[in-house]
Image (spheres, coloured by chain):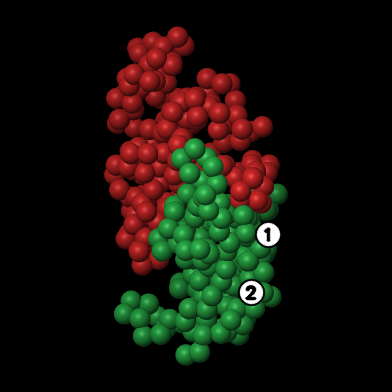
Amino acid sequence: MVVTPVADDETLYRRVPQGKNFYITQANGTVKFSSQAFADRSFRPSVDRAELCHYDPTWTQRDVSDGVASVVTRDVRSIDTVVQNDEKGNPIRVFCANVEHVPIIGHAELLSNFAHAEIYLIPNCTNKAVFRRLCERLAQLVSERPWEIEPQGIQ
Amino acid sequence: MASFGRFYESSEVVSYYSPRFSLDDASIVERIANKALKGTLSSVQNLLLWDAGWNDTSSIPPNQTAVSHAKNWIVKLYLEVSCLGRPWMQPNVTAGVYGEVVFEWWYRNHKLTIYIGDEDAEYVQVWGTDIYSEMADGNAESSSTCRSLWLWLIS
């Protein structure tokens, strides 16, 4: 499997499992996504490259009730003010976000997925506070776009 | 709410609330808080039903300790908001991948996220898109911080 660069204009799909309260629909119909929709213990949220799955968001569903949200790579890469502070609140490290193609092939636990990509920070980040802020921004970005697939059933 | 009495009798709460009502009134306060927070407390309790790997293969579900802590914390916040005479808003309730209970509120351009672990409570405030200058985080355990966060949220 060839690993290819992710272009700025590529759409990325993110699975939103139904029933986990990863979004709310406000009274005016606006959908707000939870930052937990991008939480990831490895600090690298998974997405699927729309271009490599024929622009079919059902590719990203694990269950038919799952929703699929999307974000554009350019918007992710525009996140360049992620700062880690020291205990006194002084900035000590600046991160920027990026997306890379990480196809899953022959994994013991995961289904093969050649469209799989990951959002990550440069330099590598394992700081929870920093990652939480990134998740807040990613949630804002997906909230700005319509559902690719709306979850089924009552939230 | 079995632990409500113990929570209410804790020194911090007694010292703050004693001018307003006596410990004899604890059952009345308990009933009021229970009624107002019925849906939220139920949602928090239901997190115990989530399985390991509830979001991805590495997600940890909240445990009993985190759930009890979250229930006590949300009751404390509710009482703080009541004493301030400010309106209450039900939070979105979900979980973090490390087994935290996560509360979230959206109000106008303000977003507040609270992470409740076994022993700690942490917040992320968001009031814009810039991660460095329009987001803040910290510890959310103290009553004064809870009050400040709520006043900020609804401002």
In the displayed structure, A91 sits above or below A3; it is above
Asked if residue B66 can be seen in this view, the reply is: yes
> SS class of the residue under badge 2?
strand
> SS class of the residue under badge 1?
loop
**How many numbered marks appear?**
2
For the point 62% across and 82% down, which residue is it? A51
For the point 39% across and 14% down, which residue is it? B15
Residue in front for this viewpoint, B55 or A4: A4
Give the colour in which the image draws chain A: green
Residue in front for this viewpoint, B148 or B69: B148
Q: Chain of mark 1?
A: A
Neighbourhood count class around disc 1 (C-alpha, 10 Å): few under 14, some 14–19, many 20 upward:
some
Residue A38 in the image: state x and y as whole percent. Answer: 51, 60
Quadrant where the image shows the C terminus of chain B: top right
In the displayed structure, A84 sits above or below B13; it is below
Q: Which mark is residue A144?
A: 1
